[in-house]
Every structure is written in structure tokens, then in C-alpha cells.
Image (cartoon, rainbow, N blue to C red):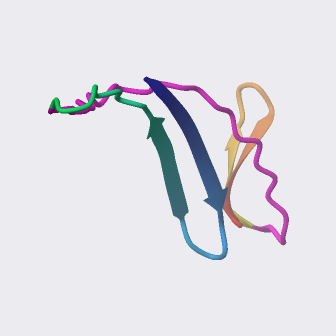
Amino acid sequence: LKAGFKHEMHFSNLNENCQTEILTWGVDSNVQVPPHYSTEASIIIEEMNYKGSYSVVTKLSGNVTISIRRQVKNSEENRIFVYISITI
């Protein structure tokens, strides 16, 4: 009995989250039966778990808007704290 197993994962992003998983396998087997005999052949397929690891590197680009919300003076240490809001 010969069996092949191929596991592929493809990721694409066109303004949406999309994940496609393709699982391909095949079986090639010869069963020899003598003349004037009968036989029964069966194939049992047991699903196994596949665990892999991958990494993704992401780069973001675009404009960033920074708004100054308020300033707080700390008179004891002569520091000014600025609270900002960042929008990407």
C-alpha cells in the first residue's frame, strides 16, 4: 500500500481576513487474486492531527493623526505630561 499526503495552507488578504486550507492525499494499491477465487479489500482511513508552526511579518503604512488632549504640569519635578490620542 502506497499513500501520499500533502498539506498546504494559503493566506491572502484583500480587505478581508481569508484563510484557505487544501488537503490532498491519494492511495495506490494492487490486490492480487488467484483465478477462481474471490476476495474483499477495504481501506481504512484514520484522520490524524497535524500541528505546525508559522510566523507572519506584517508591515503597516499610512497616515497617523496625533491629537494633544491635555497637559498636566507636575510642579514638584518640573515635568509636563502630555496625553495624546493616536489614530491610524
For the residue pair 64 and 18, the one nearer the viewer reads as 18
> Residue at 55% across / 39% down in the picture?
7
Q: Nearer the viewer, residue 67 or 45?
A: 45
Q: Residue at x 84, y 70 (%)?
A: 62
Whether residue 55 is situated above or below residue 82 in the rendered picture: above
The one nearer the camera, 25 or 1, is 1
Q: Is residue 71 shown left or right of residue 17?
A: right
Please give the range of residues in magenta. 38-65
Q: Is residue 16 above or below residue 12?
A: below
From the viewer's perspective, tell me whether residue 19 is left or right of residue 64: left
Q: Main secondary structure of the magenta part?
A: loop
Q: Is residue 84 visible?
A: yes
Q: Can you say which quadrant of the picture contains the N terminus? A: top left
- Across and down, in percent, residue 81 comes to 71, 43
Residue 49 lies, in percent from the top left, at 36, 26
47 vs 42, left or right, is right
Q: Position of residue 44 (x, y in %)?
A: 23, 30
